[in-house]
Image (cartoon, rainbow, N blue to C red):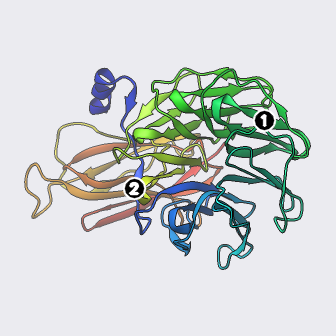
């Protein structure tokens, strides 16, 4: 913890990150990611690639590839039904979790950037220079929405019921309350190009864009107020798990986070430099993914913030140990201690590979608190379970040849 405090003193706007790089199997740009629930997600990008995860973003497998087009946006209506769009005029749809994809669209050189569905039948696609398409038959046919400004429309998003918002260049913001039959202009209060949108509930939403722009609404999108951010980089994407907790990501590897509803945004350190993040999705206050250049996928189980592990005392223990958490039961935080001795074959100054993992009652990994070397010593680990429901959880320490698992109970 002393190291973290020192970093705060030197770089007050940057927090060490716990975003982990996960293998995608390729180096093509990934433009978009979407999740149907906390476990099932998809991502798409260059070379017509579509990737799939069933464990919240920890691992990914490829379910589609076509070198003749790229895909810029994807929407998951359920774990089995998804729609992806791209260039030129590509519309792909699956009803079997990515097993097969049907193709629609034309051959004109028009890129589609974003897709969003209200329900199984009604959806919208936004794209280049006034392109805004609507379907009411599950994507079998699409029609251009009339009277749309001739500006590139970067993002479309249903935000609840029949309400949807379209974002474009020069601060353009369009609003519909009838599922896309008609649209009205909203005043965004900015001339920045707008790219990312996320609503935490029916009233509270956020938009991100160029020049470090983040806007907030508390009246369902009718009015917007600018937020203060520590960067001027373009923020391509924004995602909120609830009204308080969200992340934004964009150019030059920038990752921002807030835990107080946007009153304060702080910068997290990216594990990859000099890349562009195109999409961030939080599946809970502490779990989520970021995708971007070079086929890079980031994954977190801590919201991207530093894990709560700190050394206590200076004595070197004689044996491995793992204590019972305290308090237990707990709500929502608890802590426990573990000991790493100076083992045979490990010299002074060297570490022991330690894995400290949290499991749910079904035995599924939900958070990894430590997965790397620690020097011999006694450590305290803190766990914040604010993003998880009441129930039985387990924590397991694997260090060298030592393994131990203990049970803890979260009661809210």
Q: Quadrant of the C terminus?
A: top right
Q: Is residue 261 visible?
A: no
Q: Earlier in the sequence, mark 2 or mark 1?
A: 2
Q: Callout 1: few (<14), some (14-19), or many (20+) C-alpha neighbours within 10 Å?
A: many
Q: Position of residue 272 (x, y in %)?
A: 35, 48
Instruction: Find residue 21 and name its label.
Output: 2
Q: Position of residue 132 (x, y in %)?
A: 77, 49
Residue 86 placement (x, y as % from top left): 63, 60
Residue 359 visible within the image: yes
| Label 1 SS | strand
Side of 259 where 403 appears, left or right: left
- Rendered position, 403 above or below 322: below
The residue wearing badge 1 is 174
| Depth order, front residue of 392/182 | 182
Disc 2 packing (10 Å; few <14; some 14–19; many ≥20): some
In the image, 85: left or right of 8?
right
Q: Give the CA separation, mark 2 to mark 1.
A: 36 Å
Question: Which residue appears at 40% of the width and 53% of the height?
Answer: 20
What residue is drawn where x is 67% and y is 79%?
Answer: 100
Residue 347's disc is none
Tag count in the figure?
2
Q: Quadrant of the N terminus?
A: top left
Residue 188 in percent (x, y) is at: 71, 25
Circle 2 sits in a helix, a strand or a loop, which is it? strand
Which residue is located at x 39 percent, y 41 percent?
A: 17
Looking at the image, which residue sits at the far bottom?
A: 100
Above or below residue 382? Residue 109 is below
The answer to whether the residues at label 2 and label 1 have Cβ atoms under 8 Å apart is no
Of discs 2 and 1, which sits in the foreground? 1
């Amino acid at each position: 913890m002393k190291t973290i405090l020192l970093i705060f003193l030197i770089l007050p706007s940057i927090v060490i990150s716990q975003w982990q790089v996960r293998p995608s199997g390729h180096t093509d740009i990934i433009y978009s990611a979407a999740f149907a629930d906390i476990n099932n997600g998809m991502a798409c990008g260059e070379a017509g690639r579509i990737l799939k995860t069933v464990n919240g973003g920890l691992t990914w497998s490829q379910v589609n590839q076509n070198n003749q087009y790229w895909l810029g946006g994807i929407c998951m209506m359920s774990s089995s039904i998804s729609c992806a769009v791209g260039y030129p005029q590509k519309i792909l749809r699956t009803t079997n979790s990515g097993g097969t994809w049907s193709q629609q669209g034309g051959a004109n050189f028009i890129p589609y950037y974003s897709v969003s569905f209200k329900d199984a039948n009604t959806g919208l696609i936004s794209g280049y220079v006034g392109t805004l398409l609507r379907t009411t038959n599950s994507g079998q046919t699409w029609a251009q929405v009339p009277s749309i400004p001739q500006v590139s429309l970067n993002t479309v998003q249903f935000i609840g019921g029949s309400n949807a918002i379209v974002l474009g260049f020069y601060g353009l913001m369009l609003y519909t309350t009838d599922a896309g039959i008609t649209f009205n202009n909203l005043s965004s209060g900015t001339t920045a190009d707008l790219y990312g949108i996320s609503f935490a509930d029916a009233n509270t939403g956020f938009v991100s864009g160029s020049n470090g722009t983040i806007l907030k609404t508390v009246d369902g999108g009718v009015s917007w107020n600018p937020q203060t951010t520590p960067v001027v980089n373009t923020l391509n994407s924004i995602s909120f798990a609830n009204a308080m907790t969200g992340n934004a990501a964009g150019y030059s590897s920038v990752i921002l986070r807030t835990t107080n509803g946007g009153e304060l945004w702080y910068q997290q350190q990216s594990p990859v430099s000099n890349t562009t993040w195109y999409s961030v999705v939080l599946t809970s206050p502490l779990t989520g993914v970021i995708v971007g250049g070079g086929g890079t996928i980031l994954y977190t189980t801590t919201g991207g913030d530093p894990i709560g592990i700190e050394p206590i005392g200076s004595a070197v223990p004689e044996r491995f140990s793992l204590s019972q958490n305290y308090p237990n039961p707990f709500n929502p935080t608890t802590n426990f201690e573990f000991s790493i001795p100076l083992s045979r074959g490990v010299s002074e100054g060297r570490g022991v590979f330690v894995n400290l993992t949290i499991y749910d009652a079904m035995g599924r990994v939900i958070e990894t608190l430590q997965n790397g070397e620690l020097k011999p010593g006694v450590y305290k680990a803190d766990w914040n379970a604010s993003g998880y429901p009441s129930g039985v959880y387990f924590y397991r320490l694997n260090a060298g040849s030592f393994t131990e698992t203990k049970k803890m109970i979260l009661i809210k």
